[in-house]
Amino acid sequence: MTTGQGTHDLVHQAARRVPDRPALLDGDTAISYRELDRRALSLARRLTEHGVDRGTRVAVTVPRSAEHVIATLAVWRAGGICVPVATDLPRARVADMLRIAGVRATVGPAETIEEIAVPSAADPLDDLPAPPPGEDGTVAYIYFTSGSTGRPKAVAVPHTGIVNEAQWSHGAFAIRPEDRGSWLASPGFAISRWELWTPLTAGAAVAISPEGTVWEGSTLRDWLVRSGVNWSIVVTGLAERLLGVDWPDPCPLRVLVAGGEQLRVWPRDLPFDVVNSYGVTEASSVRLAAWLDPAAAAPGRLPPVGHPIRGTRVHVLDDELAPVAQGQVGELFIGGRGLARGYLGDPGQTAERFLPDPFLGAGHRMYRTGDLVRVAADGEVEFAGRRDGDPKVAGARVDLAAVEAALLAHPGVKAAAAAIHTGEADRPRLVGYLVTDHDDMAPDSVIDSLAERLPTPMVPNVLVRLAALPLLPSGKADRKRLPEPAPGNVLRGHRAEARDDTERRVIDVFEEILGVADIGAHDDFFGLGGDSLGVARVRRALLEQHGMDVPYTVIFRQRTPRRICAAARENGGGTQ
């Protein structure tokens, strides 16, 4: 990569090589590279007229779509830094993100541009460490990850990391202009950068999944096959479901990549390669990858995360930052090309997590991941756990302290804890524990309060009421002694009778799917033992038995019969 060459430069070069090939497939709309390049340049000129230049942070608030890709390219071509904002975040959290990033403009749907007045102050970009020797270090993205006490951390990701990842992927996965990738992740989830810029810098196409879709294994399989996708990156939990469904042979899919958390199942005989990957936002990109051989599966052995990609150096170190012996567990540190520049506006955290790299010398840094790993005899890295106990649910890191702070902010909660419990099919679920000062705490009000403060993955699936928290001698909550959710301890509101026939139908379906009697209009589907697969069964039953076409996301997010019916009416239907 030429110094100073950005991701958008490579996309522009692809547009010159293959101008008439499809770049983006968004529903029934196909956008060629020529049109993508033209629209990005046009929007970039408008952004420049609004004062966007080198280093200006611009929030892109467009949902997952061709418009989002065009807006991102336009921000980069104007010299700016893209701050992707997911559309389902609480307003207070979005406002916090824009403030931390120092956003001065937004690009919304239909290419609407709004300027934001920012108080005159020192630019937090100036506090970032200098890029390492030989790297340009121009920041492409500000991505947000969960921080302590719920304050989001703004990670400054440079173009060098994205380009290194994309160019390695071109060779590793044999990406050609004839190929087609997929975009499934939320724009605010850093893995989306891998989904987009690997194909688009190679002149290949990207099929964009419909916004708001929450996939099941079989429906995603059908969409991937129907869309002709050859190469797909999928968050780990969903990848595991894809490994368990039947696939046609021949199949257009050549490679399925799992990422986001530790893969817990090995692939069986499938008509495509399965790759397990490891990456963190602070490392700018995927950093390790393993092509999985079903024959290597063994009882008790989890799939490895593999070998470093090009331009990456990994170190497994002890508490004194000395290398551990092969086969021994140590903390994973990542160095090399394109490491994130640090945390915007938080030099203390940057210094704590981005350490001087003694193996590369002056000016270089390595990122302390907090993940424990070992190096096997064949040289592959194997995941062994988290040093700080900071878990993940559905591919998103969950800050338990932030969840507990949000629980404690609810009136009437005297003490709180949060923990991850393994539910059905060994899938983790987030459980909130409450000690309340009265017996009639309404679970709906708690969930609503949490949803206003936390991103969706950090809202507990179920609430458990306790007389008191189990404590360690230090006075801290003993999470190992927190009980599993059970019918006798799950928080349920007073049973509310259905107000109309629509609520009665939803209650009947809940009782049928869950095998639970006497469900009320305020009872939470997840609190009663439901999971995401059960949500799909509820949706199917409502449609087939009662003609109610309720979107999967409405059931998933609203949880109770009353709220599901209200949301369905607000969205303009629910019955046929």
Image (cartoon, grey):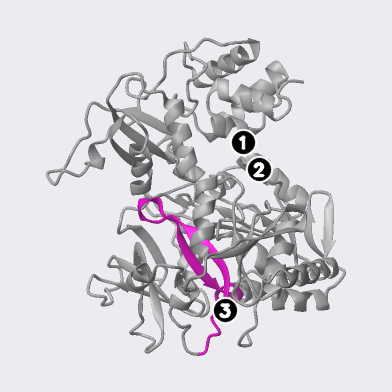
- Disc 3, disc 1: CB below 8 Å? no
Q: Is residue 252 above or below residue 459?
A: below
Q: Which residue is mark 2?
A: 212
- Other-residue count near label 2 (Cα within 10 Å), few / some / many at <14 / 14–19 / ≥20: some
Looking at the rendered image, the disc whose residue lies closer to the viewer, 3 or 1, is: 3
Residue 248 at x, y = what percent? 71, 47
Relative to 439, say whether 330 is above or below. Answer: below
**To which residue does mark 3 refer?**
138
Which quadrant would residue 179 be assigned to in this image? Answer: bottom right
Magenta region, residue range: 134-163
Q: Earlier in the sequence, mark 3 or mark 1?
A: 3
> Residue placed at 63% from the left, 76% from the top?
167
Which residue appears at 55% of the width and 60% of the height? Answer: 190
Q: Position of residue 218 (x, y in %)?
A: 65, 40
For label 3, the crowd category at 10 Å Cα-Cα, with few meaning under 14, some 14 to 19 and many 20 or more, is many
In whole angstroms, how far apart are the C-alphas of marks 2 and 1? 7 Å
**Labels 2 and 3: the sequence-earlier one:** 3
Q: Secondary structure at mark 3?
A: loop
Residue at image mark 1: 553
C-alpha span from label 2 to label 3: 32 Å
Residue 286 visible to the viewer: no
Amino acid carrying mark 2 in the image: Gly
Q: Is residue 449 left or right of residue 30?
A: left
Q: Amino acid at mark 1?
A: Thr
Residue 80, percent from left and from top: 64, 72
Q: Are marks 2 and 1 in contact (CB under 8 Å)?
A: yes
On-image quarter of the N terminus: bottom right
